[in-house]
Amino acid sequence: MKILVDENMPYARELFSRIGEVTAVPGRPIPPGALNDADALMVRSVTKVNAALLDGKRIKFVGTATAGTDHVDEAWLEQAGIGFSGAPGCNAIAVVEYVFSALLMLAERDGFSLRERTVGIVGVGNVGSRLQARLETLGVRTLLCDPPRADRGDEGDFLTLDALAREADILTFHTPLYKDGPYKTLHLADDALISALKPGTILINACRGPVVDNAALLKRLNAGQRLSTILDVWEAEPDLNVALLDKVDIGTAHIAGYTLEGKARGTTQVFEAYTAFLGTPHQVALDTLLPSPEVVRLALHGALDETTLKRLVHLVYDVRRDDALLRHVAAQPGEFDKLRKHYRERREWSSLYVQCDDADAAQRLHRLGFSAVYHPIR
Ligand SMILES: NC(=O)c1ccc[n+]([C@@H]2O[C@H](COP(=O)([O-])OP(=O)(O)OC[C@H]3O[C@@H](n4cnc5c(N)ncnc54)[C@H](O)[C@@H]3O)[C@@H](O)[C@H]2O)c1
Ligand SMILES: O=C(O)[C@H](O)[C@H](O)COP(=O)(O)O
């Protein structure tokens, strides 16, 4: 059995070679001919999976080691009898930690406390719900917008997008990209919505570029609208709108989900799905794959305030590094994908073991996702 995997998929060779012969290839584009004798294809979000790629090929299963699936024509796969799996939630923690890293940086720069701000979360799925839980642990007020969940009758106080735009100090998007249909998200943040934001609002897009109308955003920023902007994703990736990058406060190369844990979960999820598809299900324990992190443990004395939290968060992951890397190469063709391919190892907060002599600090850090324990100092 021949399995083609994206070369930007940690642990793919190690796992898939347990069941077949593995070839790793670039995903954008897949080299011509590489698909000819493959039985299964494992991609990331950069590969458009559709009839144009697969019609006439012998591929029987496609896995994408990503949360988003807008690059996959699932209806075509189904009618062609090709099995499919995504990796829902694989990198949700990574995106939440990206958002925290960025917000704590802006809070320090602009002299505010997160606890004084109201955060509007648009799309309350794997990312949005974890973000809400961690913000609430810090005592930050959140407002939620998720029409599909509201229509399903899910528990929760769901508001309209317009209500969030009116009330939130921080508006953060975590929806899939739907180009049409009742829950269309293409240009969900359009000119009218962006114009309606309160002066000083922080706008975050870490889901898919086209969810925010980039031309409208640039127009508003050029017109002097008071807005802080954090963009991880861009319309027309991998081409970058350099004029927009110049105007945003934090701009990164679609790496919000790029923790090692997040990528490894994506790989294990599609590996498990493929083996189940073959009728020989395998389970993989993530901690058997992951190496020890660079910084393993530290001791924290006293209470946990926002300044201390910021230092811990930025010790594990500081978004300014990714912002600087993108700005250095922004105008050069091909560099956006190179930054993503050669992404330096990044870990999740859970990789840091924090020993606290304050019980409340230990409890809150634990609830935030760090490996924290209370250990009184005698
Ligand atoms: N930047 C990155 O690296 C990165 C990483 C992970 C995910 N993503 C993107 O973020 C998206 C969200 O990730 P997730 O794991 O939370 O997905 P998810 O499917 O778990 O959650 C998405 C939520 O959005 C809601 N939604 C759908 N249409 C909506 C609309 N019109 N308005 C408001 N809410 C709507 C859904 O009901 C769902 O609750 C993914 O689809 C993916 O495209 C990006
Ligand atoms: O949808 C996702 O999971 C993310 O956008 C994903 O992490 C993007 O990374 P890529 O698949 O492009 O490597």
Image (cartoon, rainbow, N blue to C red):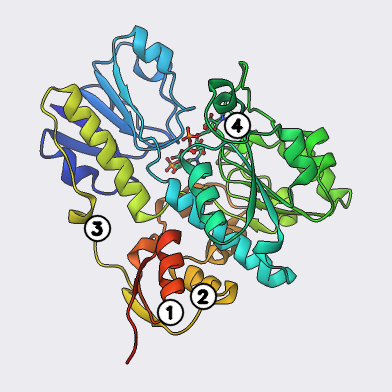
Q: Which tag, 4 or 2, sits closer to the chain's start? A: 4
Q: Is mark 4 within 8 Å of ligand 1?
A: yes
Mark 3 secondary-structure assignment: loop
Mark 4 secondary-structure assignment: loop
Q: Which residue is mark 2?
A: 304
Residue type at mark 2: give it. Answer: Leu
Q: Which tag, 1 or 2, sits closer to the chain's start? A: 2
Q: CA distance from mark 4 to mark 2?
A: 32 Å
Dot in front, 1 or 3: 1
Q: Which residue is mark 1?
A: 358
Mark 1 in CB contact with mark 2 (< 8 angstroms):
yes
Residue 313 lies, in percent from the top left, at 49, 68
Mark 2 secondary-structure assignment: loop
Q: Which residue is mark 4?
A: 146
Towards the viewer: 175 or 371: 371
Q: CA distance from mark 4 to mark 1?
A: 37 Å
Q: Which tag, 4 or 1, sits closer to the chain's start? A: 4
Towards the viewer: 33 or 251: 251
Q: Which tag, 3 or 4, sits closer to the chain's start? A: 4
Towards the viewer: 192 or 167: 167
Q: What mark, if any, has residue 158 been given in the picture?
A: none
Residue 108 as seen in the image, left or right of residue 358: right
Give the residue drawn at x 80%, y 42%. 166
Q: Residues within 10 Å of mark 4 (few under 14, many from 20)?
A: many
Q: Which residue is mark 3?
A: 290
Q: CA distance from mark 1 to mark 3?
A: 30 Å
Q: Residues within 10 Å of mark 1 (few under 14, many from 20)?
A: some
Residue 10 lies, in percent from the top left, at 29, 49
Looking at the figure, which quarter contains the N terminus?
A: top left
